[in-house]
Amino acid sequence: MAFGPVQILVVGFASDAQFKGEALEELARLREHDIVRVIDLLAVHKNEDGTFEKVEIADVEELSELGALAGALIGFGAAGETGAEVGAEAGAELGDGGKLYDEAEVWYIADSIPAGSTAVIGIFEHRWAIPLREAITRAGGVALADRWLHPQDLLAAGAEIGLAIDE
C-alpha cells in the first residue's frame, strides 16, 4: 500500500476561540475526496481550574497501518529485511490500541497550555502527493529536498531582507 507524506500539525486556540465546526467540516471534505487521511486527531482543553478534557479521534486500522510502515522503515534501516519484518509487527501492535497518546502525554500537553485554552494535534497523511511521487519515480526522479514553506516563513525572510537593506 502506498503512503503519502505524513504531517503533524499542532494548533492552539485561545479561550475566546469560536468553535463552529468549520475546521471539522473541511477535514471531512478533504477525507471524502481522498486528499488527506486523518490518522489521529487529539483535542485537549484546559479548564480555568486546571482540570482538562480530551477528545481523540483515531482510526484503529490507519494507526495500525502507519505503525507497521514506520516500524518497517526503522527496522529496515537498523537491520535490513529481518529488521523490517520485526519493526512492522511491533509498529502494528502499537497502533492496534486505537490511541496514539497515553494519559501521561495528554497530561503533558494540558500542562503546557494556558487555562481556558485548547490544543489540537492532528496527524494527517497527504494522499494527494502519492500519484505525484509515483509519476516522478517513473520518470527516474528522486526527491532531493522536501520542506513546508508557511506564510510566516516568507514574512520572516522579508523582515531579514528589510534589515539588511536598512543597514
Image: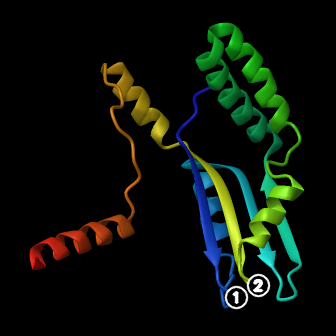
Labels 1 & 2 near each other (Cβ < 8 A):
yes
Residue type at the position of mark 2:
Ala
Q: Label 1 belongs to which residue?
A: 15
Mark 1 secondary-structure assignment: loop
Residue 22 visible (yes or no): no
- Identify the image quadrant of the C terminus: bottom left
- The kind of residue on which mark 1 rests is Ser
Residue at 67%, 28% in the rendered image: 69
145 or 38: nearer the viewer: 145
Name the quadrant containing residue 65: top right
Q: Cα distance, mark 1 to mark 2?
A: 8 Å
Going by the image, does 129 lie left or right of 116? Answer: left
* Residue 113: x %, y % from top left: 71, 75
In percent of the image, x 66 and y 86: which residue is there? 17
Q: Is residue 83 above or below residue 108?
A: above
> How many numbered marks, from 0 up?
2
Q: Secondary structure at mark 2?
A: loop
Quadrant the N terminus occupies = top right
Dot 1, how many residues are within 10 Å of its Cα: few (below 14), some (14-19), or many (20+)?
Answer: some
Residue 94: in sight, yes or no?
yes
Q: Position of residue 145 (x, y in %)?
A: 35, 38
Q: Is residue 38 above or below residue 22?
A: above
Q: Residue at x 11, y 79 (%)?
A: 166
What residue is rendered at 61% in x and 69% in y?
A: 11
Please state the horizontal and vertical placement of residue 48, each as a whole percent of the image: 82, 89
User: What is the quadrant of residue 122 in the picture?
Assistant: bottom right
Image location (x, y in percent) of residue 124: 61, 50
Residue 96 lies, with reference to residue 121, above or below; the image says above
The residue where tag 2 is placed is 115
N-term mark: 1 or 2? 1
